[in-house]
Image: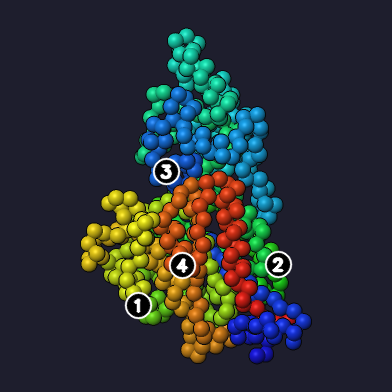
Amino acid sequence: MHSLASRLCAGLVMLGAASTASAQQVAPPNIHFLIDTSGSMRELPQISDGDHATFFNITVNGCQNARLDAMQAGNGWNPAVAYPVPDTGTGWGSDWGFPNLFQDSKFYGYMYWGEQTNPAPQWNSAVEACQSQVDNWSTTGAAEYNRCQSCLTTKGYYKLPWADGRNTPPLENPDFIFWGRFLNFNPPKYVAVKSAIKHALANVQNARVGFSYFSNTAPYSVMGQRQQVACDQSLASPFAFDTARGSSINAINGLTFTTGTPLARSLLNVGYYFTSGNDVYQSYLGFGSNYSYPSAFKNDPLTMQSRSVCWGCQHNAVILISDGDPTNDTQTSAMANRLRTINGGPVYCPDSEPCGLGGQRDKGTDPTNYADDNANFYLDDVAKVLSTWDLQMSSPVVVGNFDTSGFQRLSIHTVGYGINSNLLKNTAAVGNGTYATAYTPAALKQALQAAVNNVQAQAASCVFLQ
């Protein structure tokens, strides 16, 4: 051993040996955020499975909605309080917050906010909104007009009696009105997700961090940022990520939310990035031509300090944030069979906590024929592969100061936002990670921070002596 890095590669330094050294330093773990950028992130957290029609139907008497009312009661809604905007910025890069997301005194039509950081309000006051939408507001519609104003100024939302929701675009509807104050209290999911991830990025120390996100076209995810910073730089200082923190946060602000939910495909791409080379997926795991090997996710050579995995004992983790079940996520029968061969059989959610509903179950009706399984539900199969099999290998096993002996694999942590997902839960269980569900912006920040804390606690076993 001729350097700090090569001593790190040796693996664990037992605490009993600490008396021979002046100090110990934990090797920075790899944390990779996999971000759901699906169109459903534009919705309020209380929309279930993209079912806007039901959300409209359960809103009665102007402002009685069991989901919204439970959220308000559980989180202390007070119409007299001017709540701060949900994304005040981190101060890193150009992230100084979004003061018009949302405007406290303005009123917004349902889903007109899209994915914007400065959405235009539809009305300047409750009076203007109600006069605009309630027919004959000053005569035969006076009672409904009064209810509209009362709902908006007490509950923060109001739906006209005849308003119907749609489950296909266009989803915008001016007959369901929201006070900006209410939207600051209960923002659309995309606002909370970006804010929570930026909060995690702003606070993480002694870690290498990267992220990727969903796409509608092959390979169905985009590498937003490869792991930063370089191995030697991250080892030199626990604050090394400061040099990439601002640009990372700026990139999160630039995310758009228009995709499906290709969970398994995206996780496969992250796994590919954390392999030592094409041969791991192609030959060792036997994916062959069933995987596309996208260049954007190809790891750098193991001799480079920018490689995905730095040291043999480094802890490597994915934190997946999603709000729904998979769409546009099918695997070919050949790929599905290979995943199941590697795993020693299919990975199903427990019958007590099934994935999918009815005919959408992950498990088909014939236990001897996997062909009738749901081809969209392979996220947990992929997670088991990545958390079980060695992803870094070389001959000879030592490349520069990187010793690839032993197992370098991923732990898969999952967070469901606005959804209690059995698929995400089982993915974390078989992926040697943690699962959390969040329904508010504050809970989402806590869930992401808890996942980061877990990764760093696991990383504590990989240390070197100074």
C-alpha gap between disc 1 and disc 2: 39 Å
The percent coordinates of residue 210 (x first, y second) are 56, 64
Q: Amino acid at mark 1?
A: Gly
Q: Earlier in the sequence, mark 4 or mark 2?
A: 2
CB under 8 Å between discs 4 and 3: no
Q: Nearer the viewer, residue 314 or 175?
A: 314
Residue 306: mark in rendering: none
The secondary structure type at the circle numbered 4 is loop
Q: Earlier in the sequence, mark 1 or mark 3?
A: 3
- Identify the residue position indicated by label 3 in the image: 48
CB under 8 Å between discs 1 and 2: no
C-alpha gap between disc 4 and disc 3: 26 Å
- Please identify the quarter of the rendering in which residue 205 is found: bottom right
C-alpha gap between disc 4 and disc 2: 29 Å
Residue in view at x 61 percent, y 76 percent: 461
Task: Identify whether 279 is placed above or below 179.
Answer: below
- Identify the residue position indicated by label 4 in the image: 431
The percent coordinates of residue 175 (x first, y second) are 45, 27
Q: Earlier in the sequence, mark 1 or mark 4?
A: 1
Rendered image coloring scheme: rainbow
Of the 4 image quadrants, the one containing the N terminus is bottom right
Q: Amino acid at mark 3?
A: Ser
Residue 239: mark in rendering: 2
Residue in view at x 52 percent, y 42 percent: 188
Task: Identify whether 227 is placed above or below 423.
Answer: below
**Is residue 163 something one can see in this rendering?**
yes
Residue sitting farthest toward the front = 352
- Identify the residue position indicated by label 1 in the image: 286
Q: Earlier in the sequence, mark 4 or mark 3?
A: 3
Q: Amino acid at mark 2?
A: Phe
Residue in view at x 56 percent, y 51 percent: 444
Q: Point out the frontmost of discs 1 and 3.
A: 3
